[in-house]
Amino acid sequence: MLKSLINELIHSVTKALDKHRNVSVLDLVKPFLILSMIHSGSVCARTFCGAGRVCVSTDRGEPVCRCLEKCDVSEHWVCGSNSKSYRNHCELHRDACVTHTKIHVAHRGPCLVVCLLSDRDWLRERVVQWVQEELGSDNLTSNASSAHDLLVYTSQIYDNGDSQLDSREFLSFLKHNETALNLTLSNTLETNLLLRSLCVDALIELSDENADWKLSLTEFINCLTPTYHPPERKCALEDEVFEDGAETQMECNKCVCACGNWVCTALICKEDEEGAEEEELTEEEWSRRVAELSVLQVKHL
């Protein structure tokens, strides 16, 4: 069938040229493009590719699996085993294919973003270093001669006149001095901004003695005094104590201990959900499954 189709296409093109018609290049090439697509489809009919891949025909007419160029834009967020959030399963498998890494679905929904004690303390250290660098700078805009004076001056700029810094005002201070502070908590902008906000909340909670979620001038200075050593906080659950960064499962939700608080996903758990969804395969398992299917396909030809 394929051979006869080729002959018919060649005959029609030759006939058009014999009549000296004004035939465009596209008109001449289009039939062969269609034929190429048909041929590619027939070649790939016996080839199984893993998730995130698609079968294409090479110049020599051989089937080969390649990474998908793009996925659809449907939103069914999943968290990968690499702690990266993906819009859908296709995006996860495509990334695994492109990066040549093994990635499987850790859980439904986007990955948890939490500020751990190390993140909180790193942010605090960056601000403390900024204070020291500002005091030693020739371009100091205030007349501060000590860390105490500079923190008083800074608080007065951003406290909106009420002598208290809330999280929004603290974030405004960080943003205005972003270049000098060099605040990079994550390799993606969106996650970096979220982490910064979470860690500011953790800093405020650390020094907020009256629990009003605002830092008075005294609380702000105490928080950023170089000699201050932030305490390490742990999480408790059913008479057990968990270290910062520890993970646990609450039905279908994942929880992480972060700065003394449990932070959990908010998935709606269904009674029949457990075990209902097929376990996600790693890239190595996909390769084995594809090889098995290819063998079965050949046997049935």
Image: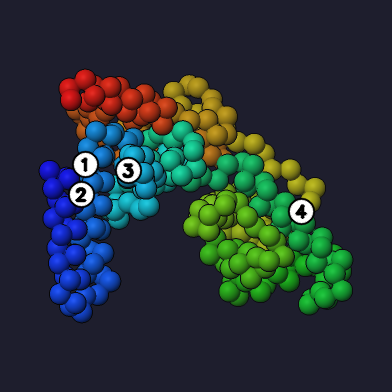
Residue 225, numbered circle: 4
Q: Position of residue 60 (x, y in %)?
A: 36, 44
In the image, what residue occupies the spot 54% across and 25% down? 241
Q: Position of residue 221 (x, y in %)?
A: 72, 58
Residue 190 shown left or right of residue 202 in the figure: left
Give the alpha-carbon distance from disc 3 to disc 2, as whole Å: 11 Å
Residue under pointer 2: 38
- Residue 157 sits above or below residue 233 on the image: below
Residue under pointer 1: 42
Task: Identify the amino acid type marked 4.
Answer: Thr
Q: Earlier in the sequence, mark 4 or mark 2?
A: 2
Q: Nearer the viewer, residue 24 or 254?
A: 24
Residue under pointer 3: 61
Say which quarter of the image contains residue 148: bottom right
For the residues carrying marks 4 and 1, which lies nearer the camera in this image? 1
For the residues carrying marks 3 and 4, which lies nearer the camera in this image? 3
At mark 3, the secondary structure is: loop
Task: Identify the amino acid type marked 3.
Answer: Gly
Q: Are marks 2 and 1 in contact (CB under 8 Å)?
A: yes
Give the alpha-carbon distance from disc 1 to disc 3, as whole Å: 10 Å
